[in-house]
Amino acid sequence: MKTKLLIILVLVLGLLTSCAPKPVHIPRPELKSKFYQHQKHLEQIKSFLLKGSVNLFSKTQSHRLIYTCVGNFKNIRLTLSSSLGQIFSIWQREPNRLIAFFPYQKIAYISSNPDLQLANFANYPLPFNLKQSVNLLLGKTPATLQNSKDLLLNPDGSVKQIKIHTYQIKYLNYVQVQNWKLPAKVTIIGPNQFKLIIYQKKIIPNFNCPQLNLNLPPQIEVYAFPLNKSQGGRNEN
């Protein structure tokens, strides 16, 4: 008798499990409303200072970098350095150009496209342009993806996970900074075992941003990007 009851119980539980609603990616209307409110609130951030660390992993190597990012979206400067303070590279977006400067190699690349996609440009560690990288660190979602089935939200409307191109972005922790809830830990997983873990240790929204002027030293070799095939891309200015 007990055996029959156990069999019936297992069958009932199995039916209940099979009939239970499965999790869906598209949020409920009230959650989506919270998401739009959260995104709109983020638009009030007009300038920023971001500091933290980036742990980069790939098939063949792993690195830990320290970053400082400051700007007002029209002008953005990202500095990547070692934990000991040695500057590896400086990336600067200006209204009419993009500069990637490598002090140790004494080389700089300049593009006339300030929003150049940087996945294959001079080993930039994020698969986006500079403005997109800042938006990502602030938890902003591109308008074209706000109805994506790959968008997962937290109960308060902040982004939990989203897929951009072939990269999976996960927001693992948020902190309250002034009037904003902003990401403190972000992971990015891409193809070929590419992985980034970003820890934001200092976030200042609407930072009193200084004027950003990047004056390259005279001994620096400057190359135009895309590279000119006949001249190797070098700019003799």
Image (cartoon, rainbow, N blue to C red):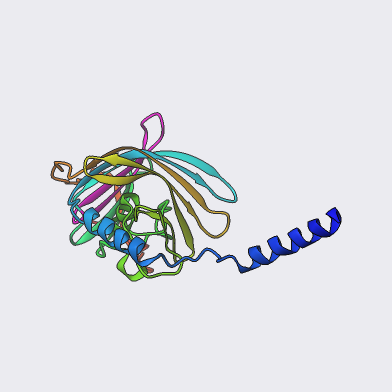
Q: Position of residue 126 (x, y in %)?
A: 41, 54
Q: Nearer the viewer, residue 138 or 178?
A: 178
Q: Position of residue 186 (x, y in %)?
A: 42, 47
- At horizontal 37% and vertical 62% (from top left) the residue drawn is 232
Q: Quadrant of residue 233?
A: bottom left
Q: Is residue 12 visible?
A: yes
- At horizontal 34% and vertical 54% (from top left) the residue drawn is 133
- At horizontal 18% and vertical 53% (from top left) the residue drawn is 44
Q: Quadrant of residue 89?
A: top left
- At horizontal 28% and vertical 62% (from top left) the residue drawn is 36
How many numbered marks, from 0 up? 0
Q: Nearer the viewer, residue 39 or 74?
A: 39
Q: Position of residue 220 (x, y in %)?
A: 29, 46
Q: Position of residue 93 (x, y in %)?
A: 24, 55
Given the current orientation, which residue lies at the most extreme front position? 1
Q: Quarter of the image for the N terminus: give it.
A: bottom right
Q: Using the image, determine if residue 30 lies above or below residue 90.
A: below
Q: Using the image, determine if residue 25 lies above or below residue 160.
A: below
Query: Which region is colored magenta?
Result: 73-93
Q: Main secondary structure of the magenta part?
A: strand
Q: Is residue 206 left or right of residue 61?
A: left
Q: Using the image, determine if residue 28 lies above or below residue 197.
A: below
Q: Nearer the viewer, residue 82 or 221?
A: 82
